[in-house]
Amino acid sequence: MKKIILGLAATVVLSGCSSDPEKLKTANDTFQKSEANIPGFSPLATGGVNLPVADNTYALPNIAFKKGENIDIRPPSTPLAIIQNSLTQFDGERALIVYPEEQTNIYNLKQVERLLKEENISSTVQGSVLTTDWSPTDRIGDKNVEIKYQIEHVTDRRSSALAVSVLQTRRDGIIFTPSVSEKQRYTSDRLNRLIYALTSAYTKQQQDLSNASVGAISSHIIQDLNGQIALAMNTTFNQAWEKLGYALPKVGFAIKSETSGRGYRELKYSSLNKEDWLRLGIESPKIDNGIYNMQISDHGKQSSMVISDEKGHSLSGDDARKIYQAISNIISR
């Protein structure tokens, strides 16, 4: 029975196979040769998708708007306590600085009037109040803005104060009322610039007097115990320190930093032109621009100075002698 069933199964399988080479298919056959009738498919007829109708309940209305004025987002300036032991404040109208009474000879209306005159700003003084003419703010972003300031000097037994307020403002010739933040900005700027200029002028005056008080210093070029060419000076360490601080920039050595207790200065050298060296009585030395160091040694009533490069090599040869001779010519005056 099993043999009969297996025989029938084999007969069915073999009958499904064809020996016709046209019927034997290969990979990727398109079936076009063996299948004459290829079914065709027409596109489906569809009505598409019906979207819901838009609800305008929450739609934003179209509003015609006008662009507002530009807003100054810079933080207002504040009066700075540049004077030692001083206090500053802006009270809503005035920027003021209060300082010790002994500083009145530096910070007063006469000095303020002198500074304004140097800036070509006219002013009038009545008693302890100074009123300026129209002047630009000199602030970035302020176009055609001019201000009249009122500067008041108040004194008592222990302290003095300078107060700056805005008297009038105009833009493009049209008067306008500044906001509180604008008043703070304008008055603080003007006060800070005045105090800074007065402080700088006084400091420079004191330095010039200090240099002049030292007087002429005799000096000569030597070779020290270490074999380095040096400048020996017949003066004390402190006087040599002050005088050299005045002389070094004259020969092209700008002072970057200094430690007076050690007699050390870091210098930046930029060569002078030929004419400047001739005015100092020497020919142009040939040393490279760059960073140098100066060291003063204390020998009681005498002192000496050596200049070296960044690597610690002291100036040598004719170039060293030319530099030291130029310095000697300056400090001998």
Image (tube, grey):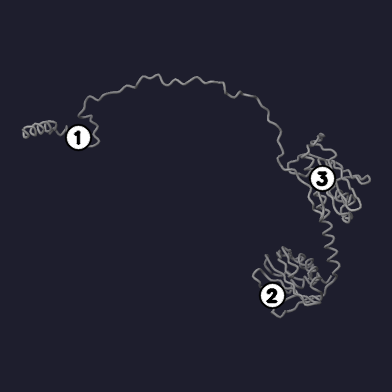
Q: Which quarter of the image is occupied by the C terminus?
A: bottom right
Return the residue at label 2: 316
Question: Neighbour class for label 2 at 10 Å: few (<14), some, many (≥20)?
Answer: some
Looking at the picture, does residue 42 appear above or below residue 135? above
**Pair 1/3: label in front:** 3
Q: Distance between the Cα atoms at labels 2 and 1?
A: 101 Å
Image location of residue 321, percent across then percent down: 73, 74
The mark nearer the N terminus, 1 or 3, is 1
Image location of residue 16, percent across then percent down: 14, 31
**Pair 3/2: label in front:** 3
Residue 324 in the figure: left or right of residue 43: right
The mark nearer the N terminus, 2 or 1, is 1
- Please, what is the three-letter code of the amino acid marked with disc 1? Lys
In what element is the residue under mark 1? loop
Q: Distance between the Cα atoms at labels 3 and 2?
A: 57 Å
Q: How many marks?
A: 3
Q: Which quarter of the image is occupied by the N terminus?
A: top left
Image location of residue 227, percent across then percent down: 69, 79
Residue 203 in the figure: left or right of residue 1: right
The mark nearer the N terminus, 3 or 2, is 3
Q: Residue furthest bottom?
A: 225
- What label does residue 95 carry, if any? 3
Q: Are marks 2 and 1 in contact (CB under 8 Å)?
A: no
Q: Residue 164 occupies which quadrant of the picture?
A: top right
Given residues 90 and 172, the one toward you in this image is 90
Return the residue at label 1: 25
- Please, what is the three-letter code of the amino acid marked with disc 3? Ala
Point 85% across, 66% down: residue: 212
